[in-house]
Amino acid sequence: MANANSLLLSVHVITAIVIVVLILLQKGKGADMGSAFGAGASGTLFGAKGSANFLSRTTAVLASVFFITSLTLAYLNKGTVVSDSVLDQVESPNVVPKETIESEPQIPQE
């Protein structure tokens, strides 16, 4: 099970890195005006409009893979999380309730 989690986590991290790279490669909406007048985009590998469709579809597929791996990792690790917090190791001090402090002192009956 540990190997499956490691493999799934590796796929998750690689997918996240590739998504970031693909998003940075895509042009913004304002860049379409320059390509409409022949700003050299037609000589690229995918053509003038081909790169936008390819990159956006690849980003959508990788986003789906990222979402599925996120849910799968959360489901597989829901009961195995061990808290190593320092605050969990601290014992709570004995706190006297406020009502006993403000009440009148009790005189022992003889």
Image: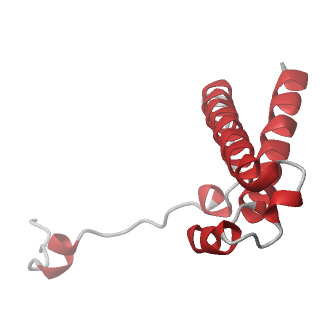
Above or below for 12 versus 27: above
Q: Nearer the viewer, residue 62 or 74?
A: 62
Above or below for 8 versus 47: above
Position of the N terminus by quadrant:
top right
- Could you say which quadrant of the image residue 95 lies in? bottom left
Q: Is residue 3 left or right of residue 57?
A: right
Q: Nearer the viewer, residue 36 or 84?
A: 36
Position of the C terminus by quadrant:
bottom left
Q: State the residue at coordinates (75%, 58%).
A: 20
Q: Residue furthest top?
A: 1
- Could you say which quadrant of the image residue 90 lies in? bottom right
Q: How many labels, in total?
A: 0
Q: Give residue 70's position: percent from left, percent from top.
A: 65, 37
Q: State the residue at coordinates (76%, 50%).
A: 51
Q: State the residue at coordinates (31%, 70%).
A: 96
Q: Is residue 66 left or right of residue 108?
A: right
Q: Is residue 31 left or right of residue 20?
A: left
Q: Nearer the viewer, residue 4 or 102?
A: 4
Q: Give residue 81's position: percent from left, percent from top.
A: 67, 38
User: Is the image coloured rainbow, by chain, by secondary structure, or in one colour?
Assistant: secondary structure
- Could you say which quadrant of the image residue 58 lies in? top right
Q: State the residue at coordinates (65%, 41%).
A: 63
Q: Give residue 40's position: percent from left, percent from top.
A: 83, 69
Above or below for 42 versus 107: above
Q: Residue furthest front?
A: 37
Q: Nearer the viewer, residue 74 or 12?
A: 12
